Image (tube, grey):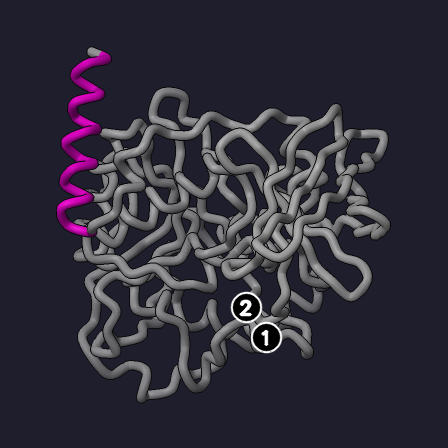
């Protein structure tokens, strides 16, 4: 059985390479980094500078970002760290003209989380983004609304009229996401467990276009060869829900979502999904490089931090989705559009 699973995965990997030219899916899944190591990975700042500590193939690396516009640290200078003893490392910078060494030492809080990084004579403080690897247990939340405020916002969104221009185009036939065999539906906006701290939908079911659902079925079958399945966090979003979410945003953060009165959201078409991975053998949701809807540098698809395992799984997810007609975006590693096109009509069909 183990040999059969290996051969199945190898064939799937070769198919992925043949169609995408990507070798990542052929590599073995990297082992998980130890907990004490993961607790010091992350973003540190000080002296007007930013550094990133990541794990790569079993060792730590320091990434120095020399350009603030490089939000994903994709072009940062990379310095391997050689461990001397617990939380103490040696960083060597060698070149044809010079060579220097510096001690790198981490400080932790009483719970074992890294809170500072000393590089030579410079001190960098840890910035905690939210939930996820190496982070203190917390979730990002926008400022809370009272029950009365939510009632007013819902009434305003329900009374709003979707612009006629957004309704033009081909309409997707919506189906219950449960038709995708094996998919794990965890509607984030169907409960209060999201960045708004309140449910935006009146149901915890998720819906999407029939063609997108058929494509997700193929992705699900493909990932099964690697021992993973899809977790679906969001899919079709009625236009009125996009309006509600935009209204609920703080005044100085409206730019975080598309303006429903002009552009609308691709989620309104039924052809966009937000997904992660889960383990088929245990049903456990896989720890990815960031939490869903986490507004931080970790949300970028090319973010260079985290662990080797997290980066591998992010690539596996993206390559598998794009193999069957989905297109990922740089801003959010979890978001994919099915056959991106302006020809799809935005919908305001309520779901229950």
Q: Magenta span has 48?
A: no
Determine the residue positioned at 40% across, 40% down: 312
Separation of disc 1 and disc 2 at Cα? 5 Å
Question: Helix, strand or loop at disc 1?
Answer: helix
Query: In the image shown, does 316 or 116 lie closer to the viewer?
Result: 116
Q: Which residue is mark 2?
A: 245
Query: In the image shown, does 91 or 210 lie closer to the viewer?
Result: 91
Query: In the image shown, does 82 or 201 lie closer to the viewer?
Result: 82
**Furthest-front residue in this view:** 97
The segment highlighted magenta reads 2-20
Looking at the picture, how far across and down is residue 265, in whole percent? 40, 72
Characterize the magenta stretch by its predominant secondary structure: helix
Mark 2 Cα-neighbour bin, 10 Å: few <14, some 14–19, many ≥20: some
Q: Left or right of 307: which side holds 27?
A: left
Question: Helix, strand or loop at disc 2?
Answer: helix
Q: Magenta span has 13?
A: yes
Looking at the picture, how far across and down is residue 151, in whole percent? 63, 67
Label at residue 247: 1
For the C terminus, the quadrant is bottom left
Circles 1 and 2 in contact, beta carbons < 8 Å: yes
Quarter residue 338 falls in? bottom left
Q: Left or right of 176: which side holds 130?
A: right
Q: How many marks?
A: 2
Looking at the picture, how far across and down is residue 267, in whole percent? 37, 65
Determine the residue positioned at 31% across, 33% down: 27
State whether residue 163 is above or below residue 199: below
Determine the residue positioned at 33% across, 67% down: 349
Q: Is residue 192 visible?
A: no
Q: Is residue 322 visible?
A: yes
């Amino acid at each position: 059985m183990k040999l059969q699973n290996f051969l199945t995965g190898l064939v799937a990997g070769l198919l992925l390479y043949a169609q995408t030219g990507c070798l990542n899916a052929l590599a073995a899944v990297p082992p998980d980094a130890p907990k004490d190591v993961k607790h010091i990975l992350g973003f540190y700042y000080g002296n007007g500078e930013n550094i990133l500590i990541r794990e790569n193939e079993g060792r730590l690396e320091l990434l120095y970002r020399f350009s603030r516009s490089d939000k994903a640290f994709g072009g940062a200078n990379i310095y391997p760290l050689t461990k001397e003893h617990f939380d103490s490392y040696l960083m060597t910078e060698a070149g044809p003209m010079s060579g220097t060494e510096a001690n790198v030492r981490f400080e932790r809080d009483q719970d074992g989380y890294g809170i500072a990084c000393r590089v030579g004579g410079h001190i960098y403080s840890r910035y905690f983004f939210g939930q996820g690897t190496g982070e203190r247990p917390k979730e990002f939340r926008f400022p809370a609304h009272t029950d009365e405020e939510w009632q007013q916002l819902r009434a305003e969104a329900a009374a709003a009229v979707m612009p006629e221009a957004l309704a033009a185009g081909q309409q997707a036939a919506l189906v219950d996401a449960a038709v995708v065999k094996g998919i794990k539906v965890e509607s984030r906006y169907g409960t209060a467990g999201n960045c708004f701290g309140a449910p935006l939908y009146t149901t915890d079911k998720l819906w999407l276009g029939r063609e997108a659902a058929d494509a997700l079925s193929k992705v699900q079958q493909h990932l099964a060869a690697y021992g993973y399945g899809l977790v679906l966090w969001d899919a079709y979003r009625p236009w009125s829900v996009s309006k509600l979410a935009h209204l609920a945003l703080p005044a100085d953060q409206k730019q975080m979502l598309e303006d429903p009165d002009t552009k609308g959201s691709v989620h309104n078409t039924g052809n966009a999904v937000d997904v992660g991975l889960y383990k088929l053998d245990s049903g456990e949701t896989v720890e990815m490089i960031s939490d869903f809807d986490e507004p931080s540098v970790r949300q970028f698809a090319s973010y260079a931090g985290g662990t080797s395992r997290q980066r591998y799984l992010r690539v596996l997810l993206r390559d598998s989705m794009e193999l069957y007609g989905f297109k990922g975006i740089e801003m959010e590693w979890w978001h994919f559009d099915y056959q991106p096109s302006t020809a799809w009509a935005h919908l305001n069909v309520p779901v229950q």
